[in-house]
Image (tube, rainbow, N blue to C red):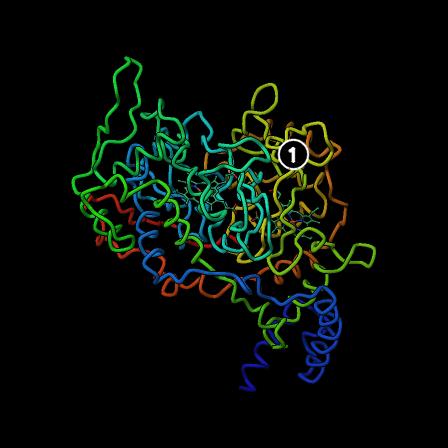
Amino acid sequence: MKKILIGLCALGIAGYNVSATAGNGKMHKHQKHLNRTLRPIIRQLGLTGDPLIGRDVPDINSPEAQLGMELFFSKSLGGDRDSACVTCHHPLLGGGDRLALPIGTESEDPDLLGPGRENDEGVDGATLPPVPRNAPTTFNVVAWDTFQFHDGRVQSLNSVPGANGSAGGIRTPNSEFGVADPLAGGNLVQAQARFPVTSREEMKGFNHNPYSDQDIREFLAARLGGYDGPEVLGDNGEALADEDPLNDSGYWLAKFEDIFGGDVNQPETMITEQRVSMLIGEYERSQAFANTPWKSYVEGNNWAISANAKRGAILFFTSSEQGGANCSSCHSGDFFTDESFHNLAMPQVGSGKGNGADGSKDFGRARETGLQDEATDKFAFRTPSLINVEVTGPWSHAGAYATLGAVIKHHSNAANAIENFDDTQLAAEGVSNLDKMQENTLEALNFSSFELETLNLSDMQVGFLVEFLKTLTDPCVTDNTCLAQWIPVAGEGDTNGDQLDAVIIDSSFPQ
Ligand code: HEC
Ligand code: HEC
């Protein structure tokens, strides 16, 4: 035991020259000093280290989460059967896709996920990837109480801490701003899960254009159940049918019957879009990974994190007036987010969300609130949680940064970071559009909503902050054996052949 402690201690001090040759006694003294600074900060902020306390987290082995997992991995929910939820949210890829900008439908190889995935046109194709924002992780979506999406377009109208949006109405893109969508479902995660299937670029594909949002959801439920979906007329005025129906709807009907009971001979009441989204949501909500070294430290284990991580934590939680980096003013609480929106002028790479004269901009939160001239909303995006942030890169709303150090340097001096932006990773993905990026990002930087102070952190301080962020990683998310519970066994299950058994050629984590 003693040996391990000394090992940890030495690791912690690595890179901190003063102590590199000091004796163990001195190192311990150092740690004590850091603990004496950090513990009162933790007490004062009322942190527990655990963003999941008191939450209703479904067990991955529950029947709902199990069937939800199959649906999450099923290309049957892609209009053209070439994209599934997991296409952009794979557990082995940090609950995202490890790409700056995702590729959903019309990929070269639908089952190849992560780096190497290409649009049909290929990397050299002239077009930018059609999905304009980075895919956030599905890990710990059970811990959000107010917003889903970078711009919060799914919103709990009665946000209650710990309730995951289950305590009242939920606004979605299918209802007016501030008005509850009657079909949103029981919590924020179910409400969100009803939207990817409506996006041509993500899942709907381009052969189902005439389908409205609700029609495509009902069409897909009907496909699973093998019954007639909503009547939708094509360009020639004739009703559209599923050109690619499943061979074996009985597979899904039996699974739904196991959970909901009822009569498989009435498939239209057995498999409904509401049940599909609820089940997918339960699977996602079971992805609760927050058993971190940081939690262990907050709970009292002084040896759970390194000395440099403690230095990073002190910077993180201390205001700039007191010499800190002020990170927790936005990344607050145990989930490390204020669930609010801020303009950080993160590089606007990719095709944009159709805003501005040429459509290449993304106005962020202002797209929802309509308050485009107000200082608070334009170019503002939701503060991400930092739990497991080590494995959820590339980072920021358009995936512009390939290392944690680079994201932190942006926070430290945004103008500098934009000017010296390194597009190597983006060029490799075929996403680089440097000129437009500079133009659009500088507009955000110079807009009144821009919120960052210039900290000019030293490289050493950035290093400490990175060390701290790495203590927010639950060991399960870097352990394939642990994650296996959240991945269906390849080649088993769905008799329709639509289970997406991912081919991942590069699962290394950028640092
Ligand atoms: C082509 C890639 C792609 C596919 C397929 C896809 N997503 Fe996403 N997902 C994204 C992107 C991009 C965003 C962020 C969009 C935004 O904020 O505007 C997102 C956002 C989310 C979020 C919000 C997380 C948060 O922190 O707010 C959840 C949850 C989610 N997706 C779940 C799903 C589910 C469930 C499915 C299947 C029904 C799915 N996704 C299919 C790319 C994808
Ligand atoms: C003014 C509020 C604010 C402050 C202060 C702040 N952040 Fe952020 N942070 C955000 C927002 C908002 C984003 C997402 C912005 C975007 O993508 O456009 C973000 C993004 C990040 C990301 C990328 C996460 C991801 O999933 O893409 C990291 C890492 C991060 N911040 C760490 C820090 C650190 C470390 C500090 C202190 C040096 C800090 N932040 C200070 C609001 C803030």
Looking at the image, which is closer to me, 390 or 163? Answer: 163
Image spot of residue 131 (x, y percent):
46, 33
The residue lying at 20 percent from left, 48 percent from top is: 251
Image spot of residue 411 (x, y percent):
69, 47
| Residue at disc 1, CB closer than 8 Å to ligand 2 | yes
Q: Is residue 261 left or right of residue 120?
A: left
Report the amino acid beneath label 1: Phe
Q: How many marks?
A: 1
Please, is residue 268 above or below residue 37 in the view? Answer: above
The residue lying at 33 percent from left, 34 percent from top is: 218
User: What quarter of the picture does the C terminus occupy?
Assistant: bottom right
Number of residues whose C-alpha sits closer than 10 Å to that of mark 1, classed few (under 14), some (14–19) or many (20 or more): many
Residue found farthest to the top:
236
Looking at the image, which is closer to me, 30 or 345? Answer: 345
Please, is residue 236 above or below residue 211 in the view? Answer: above
The residue lying at 68 percent from left, 62 percent from top is: 312
The residue lying at 27 percent from left, 57 percent from top is: 489
Q: Is residue 37 left or right of residue 259?
A: right
Residue found farthest to the bottom:
2
Please, is residue 190 above or below residue 348 in the view? Answer: below
Q: Quadrant of residue 492?
A: bottom left
Label 1: which secondary element: loop
Q: Quadrant of residue 308?
A: bottom right
Image spot of residue 339 (x, y percent):
62, 48
Q: Quadrant of residue 60?
A: bottom left
Looking at the image, which is closer to me, 130 or 80? Answer: 80
The residue carrying mark 1 is 379
Residue found farthest to the left:
247
Image spot of residue 277 (x, y percent):
38, 44
